[in-house]
Image (spheres, grey):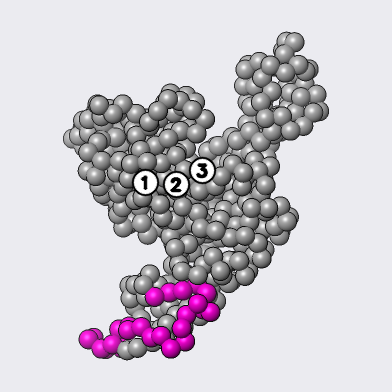
Amino acid sequence: MRSNLIAGLDIGTTKTCAVIAELIGERRRRPELKILGVGQARTAGVRREVVTHIEETTVTIQKAIKEAELMGGVSVDRVWAGISGDHVRAHSSLGVVAVGGDEIRQGDLTRVHSVARAVALPPDREFLHAIPQEYLVDQQRGIKDPIGMSGTRLEADVYLVSCSSPAANNIRRAVSRAGYRVQSLVLTPLATARAVLTEDEKEVGVALVEIGASTTQLAVFYEGKIRHVGLLPFGGDTLTNDLVRGLSIPFGEALKAKEQHAVAFAQLVDPQETVELPGPSPGQHRHVARELIAHIVEQRLDELFGMVQEELERHELLDRLGAGIVLTGGTAALHGIVEMGGQVFACPVRIGVPGEGLSGLAESVRRPRFAAVTGLCLHGADRFYETGEGASTLSSGAMARIGAWIREFF
């Protein structure tokens, strides 16, 4: 009987993904997961990463998780769910306390965290994360773990992330109506970073650029710490809409053309190559130069990457990216996007896919579009090893179904 199961749920604008994994091995600094099941469903009831229709989102969640459960032959009762959107806010906060004894103890650490979190939030907002950046003991900087050190003054630099309470509660309601519960909401870029970035990259400086359907999310790390998160209101659907206008075809056909024929860097396309697309009348077809599709996609990506570059420059982060840029999200699967990114950013660019610490059906999630949901599982595994909470069992999955049945009839 599998006793420790971790489930991740990524509710995207166009697609919802669920992954169920089993924790294997003893507790360690970097948990290992055996991927058991993967589920996907076309999203309904979500716009720009925010739930807009509870019932439609509920059906989407049910389909994705049930597919993952069926593949893995297991049941879960809780999920680690991602949250993002332009309602997310993040900033640093400093906490300061006097050390109670002759050395710093866990109680001092708890107090300084509480002081750093003592920031007034409006009634419609809630905290998502309080991430310790570094500690200072009697003005000495760069301390990662002050427990056991001597000192009289302890300071903590904490990165606080908050979100809209209504947006968070709507995710919780949709998941609850689907027969599960949210163990915790996790900022999607942080989860994605857990899956695709290395500790060395975070230390020397790296920017994660996650290109979703409707938004592009940015997370920057250096010196091992999260330094900036941001969101741009453009994503893969923007490229598709450009193809709709540029090729005079319906959205569905433009999406197929993007997935099957698009290239992010037009220089990689043979100018003589053509592809077949629907014509203006039913049953008609026409041949279009693949280079035209590439030019349309390249122009929009050039604009998008330019906006990312401006964001990095505005926050004085561009010169700190020793490890360059890591592209992920569904749109990062476009052929030639690394070459395109390298030309714009003039620094190392690679595609980020989950891989480290995974076994089982790991090949099923080694794609950019599964980076966020796999990262949610890894984040959940980290928290479970820290607190002993957040995992499902086969028996608790059965109890979840009973609870869902009771809610439905009573």
Quadrant in the picture for residue 105: top right
Vertical comparison of 150 with 29: above or below? above
Vertical comparison of 197 with 79: above or below? below
Look at the image and tell me whether residue 91 can be seen.
no
Magenta stretch bounds: 261-285
* Dot label at residue 362: 1
Give the residue drawn at x 25%, y 41%.
72
Amino acid type, mark 1:
Ala
Vertical comparison of 23 with 325: above or below? above
Give the residue drawn at x 36%, y 56%.
15
Nearer the camera: disc 3 or disc 1: 1
Judged from this view, the residue extending furthest toward the right is 139
Dot 3 falls on a residue whose secondary structure is: helix
Examine the structure image and report whether residue 268 is included in the region drawn in magenta.
Answer: yes
Give the residue drawn at x 71%, y 52%.
320
Residue 387 in the image: state x and y as whole percent.
Answer: 47, 24
Residue 310 in the image: state x and y as whole percent.
Answer: 67, 63
Which residue is disc 3 drawn over? 194
Q: For this view, does 73 lie left or right of residue 103?
A: left
Q: Pick whichever of labels 3 and 2 is earlier in the sequence.
A: 3
